[in-house]
Amino acid sequence: MTISQRFKGKRVLVTGAASGIGRRISEQFAEEGAKVTGLDIEGGSNDAPFPLLQLDVTNARDVEATSTQLRQEDPRIDVLVNAAGVLRLGDVGSLTQDDLKVSLSVNACGPFYLMQQWLPLFKQQRSGAIVNVASNAAHVPRNGMAAYCASKAAMASISHCVGLELASFGVRCNVVSPGSTDTPMLGDMFKHPDEKQRLITGLPEQFKLGIPLGKIATPNDVAEVVLFLASDQAGHVTLQDIVVDGGATLAA
């Protein structure tokens, strides 16, 4: 079997699959032979090369209902990827209660609900992999990103606990933490055309030292690492958090 078909026949679920990093992850799994089901609050996209179901990951009841339906259709799972995310900007003094609640609900509670639904099946199968997409913001503080940093750090911590719980069943759980990536979410942060280049060279007023590799990541850069961690090539890798940010955290 060639590496391009390493997921042939595997069943893969991906949240946040309508756009950005989640979309590219889903596409690449499909290209490598997987049977992908995308889950996103913006479901039903006709141009997706995989089924895309509408799901609000912050609604635990909806997550349970959708998961039950999917298990009835096919009582197995090989890979679960939690890539849905939301960014609310503002310093602690200006963030609203809703900003914090939404950030934690999407970025931490959503993955928790999905994993809770599928852990029994992973344990029963004694096989499979979970990959959760956090952020390098979970590793270093950022001005104006307290809610995002906290929610992604919570997700990473939950992931490590899940990985520990699943290890004795032969199931792996890892985290990928991207830095600045060329997605609609990042684009929404730019107010001026030169801000993208300033992000690369550094924003000292925000205590961002820049990106040593001199470029912003593409969704494909992140997807490649996610697929590696989900594959048999990473069969002895679990409880890890791989930072994909061109060196921006300077190994912090």
Image (cartoon, helix red, strand yellow):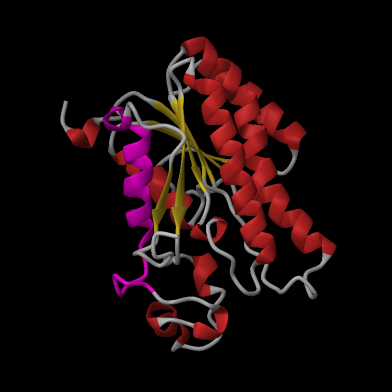
Instruction: Please state which of residues 243 and 123 is positioned toward the viewer in this rendering.
Output: 243
* Residue reaching furthest to the top: 124
Residue 64 lies left or right of residue 190; in this view the side is right
Instruction: Please state which of residues 175 and 101 is positioned toward the viewer in this rendering.
Output: 175
| Position above or below: 122 against 149 | above
Residue 213 in magenta stretch: yes
The residue under the point 38% across, 53% down is 222
Tell me where residue 233 appears, x and y as whole percent.
Answer: 26, 31
What secondary structure is the magenta-colored segment mainly?
helix
Tell me where residue 133 appears, x and y as whole percent.
Answer: 50, 47
Which image quarter holds the C terminus? bottom left
The answer to whether residue 30 is visible is no
* Residue reaching furthest to the front: 252
The residue under the point 35% across, 62% down is 218
The answer to whether residue 88 is visible is yes
* Residue reaching furthest to the right: 97
| Position above or below: 172 against 132 | above
Tell me where residue 5 appears, x and y as whole percent.
Answer: 23, 32
Which image quarter holds the N terminus? top left
Residue 251 in magenta stretch: no
Residue 21 lies left or right of residue 65; in this view the side is left
The residue under the point 76% across, 63% down is 99
How many numbered circles does the render carry?
0
Q: Specify the segment rendered in magenta.
A: 211-234
Residue 30: name its quadrant. Answer: top left
Residue 87 lies left or right of residue 187; in this view the side is right
Instruction: Please state which of residues 110 and 169 is positioned toward the viewer in this rendering.
Output: 169
The residue under the point 38% across, 43% down is 226
Residue 191: name its quadrant. Answer: bottom right
Instruction: Please state which of residues 29 and 155 is positioned toward the viewer in this rendering.
Output: 155
Tell me where residue 46 appears, x and y as whole percent.
Answer: 48, 48
